[in-house]
Amino acid sequence: MIPSFVNPSFGESQTAVAIAFAVIAGALAVAFVIVAVQTRRDVPAERVRQVAYRLRPAWLGFLVLLLTGAVGISLFLLPYSGAAGAARSVEVTGGQFYWSLSPERVPADCRIRFEVTSADVNHGFGVYDPAGILLGSVQAMPGYTNHLELTLDEPGTYQIACLEFCGVKHHEMVRELEVAAGPCCSQGADCP
């Protein structure tokens, strides 16, 4: 049985990757069949060397184009945020065995920048949506501030949990963050 939060349908990018994989796999299968058929004949070594040296630049060019295309296409699919900065900041401090958040309530559909640090040891700061799905995580380290930007789409109670074993009560290091329906406003404005 498939869990309710798993979407089994393919998107456009997954379909394109599946088609490209099928075409490349089919081409390789044809190449292997051709090589297998030709191995039954006795071919002089000089002839093999000539064909290999003639095919080598074409094969290199194909691989360079394939890898360059794959990297180029994947750059558009990266999950990094756009150029727009976060509208709200939340200061987060982790300690054994608590999370301190300021503010404790943020608006929905607003880009939130979590500024995460630690008061004592390393902690793993993880944000879970109301359905229990991990939305993002970052390390909380003493003497250093890490940043995590997320858009919390739906109003509700989000869970903050420690994802790195930090001591005896690590399992109790959980905190709630309220995400309320309301306008997304910029830092310094009259925000909820």
Image: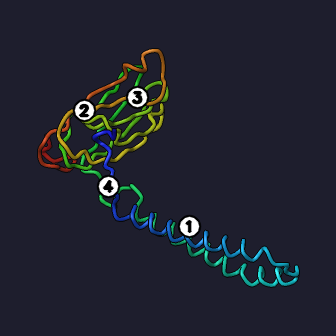
> Looking at the picture, how far across and down is residue 167, in whole percent?
48, 18
Q: Amino acid at mark 1?
A: Ala
Identified at 51% across, 67% down, the residue is 70
Q: In the rendered view, tell whether residue 116 sits above or below residue 22.
A: above
For label 2, the residue is 177
Query: Is label 3 or label 4 in front?
Result: 4
Q: Residue furthest top?
A: 168
**Badge 3, how many Cα within 10 Å: few under 14, some, many 20+?**
many
**Badge 4, how many Cα within 10 Å: few under 14, some, many 20+?**
few
The Cα atoms of the two marked residues, 1 and 2, are separated by: 48 Å
All told, the count of numbered labels is 4
State if disc 3 and disc 1 touch (CB < 8 Å): no
Residue 98 numbered mark, or none: none
> Looking at the picture, how far across and down is residue 156, in whole percent?
18, 36
Is 181 left or right of 144, judged from the image as shown? left
Which type of secondary structure does the marked residue at label 1 adopt? Answer: helix
For label 1, the residue is 25
The Cα atoms of the two marked residues, 2 and 4, are separated by: 31 Å
Q: In the rendered view, tell whether residue 69 sits above or below residue 100.
A: below
The Cα atoms of the two marked residues, 3 and 4, are separated by: 32 Å
Q: Earlier in the sequence, mark 1 or mark 2?
A: 1
Which type of secondary structure does the marked residue at label 2 adopt? Answer: strand
Identified at 15% across, 39% down, the residue is 180
Q: Amino acid at mark 3?
A: Cys
**Which is more toward the observer, 1 or 146?**
1
Q: Amino acid at mark 4?
A: Ser
Q: Amino acid at mark 2?
A: Leu
Identified at 83% across, 80% down, the residue is 49
> Looking at the picture, how far across and down is residue 74, in whole percent?
46, 64
The quarter holding residue 6 reads: top left
For label 4, the residue is 9
